Amino acid sequence: MNKHFLGDTAVLLGRSLRHIARSPDTIITTAIMPIAFLLLFVYVFGGAIETGSDSYVNYLLPGILLITIASGISYTAYRLFLDLQGGIFERFQSMPIARSAVLWAHVLTSLVANLISLVVVIGVALLIGFRTGAGVLGWLAVAGILVLFTLALTWIAVIPGLTAKSVDGASAFSYPLVFLPFISSAFVPTGSMPGPVRAFAEHQPVTSIVNAIRDLYTEQRVGTDIWIALAWCIGILVAAYVFAGVTYRRRIS
Amino acid sequence: MSIPPTEHQVEQPAIRVRGLEKSFKQVTVLRGVDVDVARGSIFALLGSNGAGKTTMVKILSTLLKADAGTARVNGFDVATQAADVRESISLTGQFAAVDQILSGRENLVLVARLRHLKDPGAIADDLLRRFSLTEAGNRRVATYSGGMRRRLDIAMSLIGNPPVIFLDEPTTGLDPEARIEVWQAVRDLARGGTTVLLTTQYLDEAEQLADRIAILHEGRILVNGTLDELKRLLPPAEVEYVEKQPTLEDVFLTLVGAGTDREQR
């Protein structure tokens, strides 16, 4: 590792965070869609959904948090794409800096921006009646899962950011990620779904992650779900990180 | 135009390129390029679009790997000593590589920090002054004119005083007044001892600035010499074109009232 890696990453992170501070609309737009889903499902559809939980907002929030992250990470692809287009990426690459710092700065920026969006969404959820008895440890565990999920999805976002031919292409990849929670236990229990859909829903990452967060919020014993959730997050994270690294090296050589 | 056309034997040239080749899939862009650039000189790589100028600059600035041949910048091999090359150079790409959302000053501070220099703020303020950007220093770059952006771009390239600077089509898309501003900045650089390799598709730009000019065409250097040497080679029709361009520009500048700039030309 280059001796300047940490310093260079910090400098470039400062740059990206300034971008966010100067266009806070990216945080707002990230949070608006999940908040709209939250309100829509709690106040329109929720009454007709039988979850076995006494409060639908409590049932719904974990999935909404994942949707927030899935829509937030598309900004990483977008910002990376703009850096490549604008030529500043080449300026950085021709300078004596740690080369991976350029990517890490974008990834850490995504983490900060998504955490802010998540706080906004949780704030709205609290306003409309979300309640949890989870203590500090419970919240820390939830935060840990969300951070891992954000990192995993952000490294996926790096790939289209490096390879896209247009701005639209750079952010279009996130649509299926936003859609994934709908075919999971995020909105309705999987038991109500027909066979093949149910099989998919029960074996895709979102369901185990949602169930793990839900258990942490309701202070139930976390079962195997949390281990499956962690395995998914770390597995996706490692695979996306390796693939993004390969894409990056191909891009800069 | 005092640089002798013969190679320096005493001192290594700032840039030495031998047999450079590069292809992208089926398209051969460079077919064996040989070039030497003397220290402290301005060298213009002249060529039409697609001639391979940008590819060559990217190889010299370690952004691309050559398929064959060698290139040394400031004595370091671009393939095996890329980190040393990056310490020695600055690249100003075809499009002003500045951060639009940051202010001019923040851009300069950013580069100074990434070059691990002490007192980035003082470096930024000094460059803002040298490039007449002090007043605009705290404004976002998005509000700058094309000429101001280019000046900022070049100012960013000077941070850390790299001995070799690459300018890839530094005046493409600029209006005549902004071009003159950029030309002045380039001349000041060379006067300070920096080696400048610039690519251009404008004949008059090479004529105005360069100590030596090489014409890159279809991946090969057709000619390489001083302006006077080249003038004797070029067919008369093209010479006429060179002569005509400044005249039009003079008319333009006179009409828009920038008469004083003519003295700098």
Image (tube, rainbow, N blue to C red):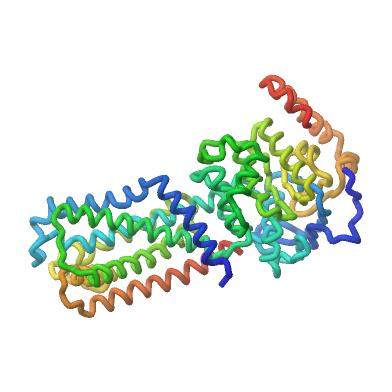
Specify whether residue A70 is in view: no
Q: Quadrant of the N terminus of chain B?
A: top right
Q: Is residue B194 above or below residue A99?
A: above
Q: Observer-nearest residue: A221 or A225?
A: A221
Residue at image position (86%, 40%) is: B234
Q: Residue at x 53, y 63 (%)?
A: A7
Above or below residue B207? Residue B68 is below
Give the left or right position of residue B228, taking residue B219 as reference.
right
How many numbered circles does the render carry? 0
x and y, in percent, of residue B101 in the image: 49, 44
Whether residue A246 is visible here, answered yes or no, is yes
Q: Nearer the viewer, residue A205 or A142?
A: A142
Picture quadrant of residue B131: top right
Image coordinates of residue B140 in percent, x first then y, are 51, 40
* Residue B161 screen position, x and y as percent: 70, 53
Residue under the image location 69 percent in, 19 percent down? B255
Residue A65 in percent (x, y) is at 26, 60
Q: B2 or A164: nearer the eye?
A: B2
For the C terminus of chain B, give its image quadrant: top right
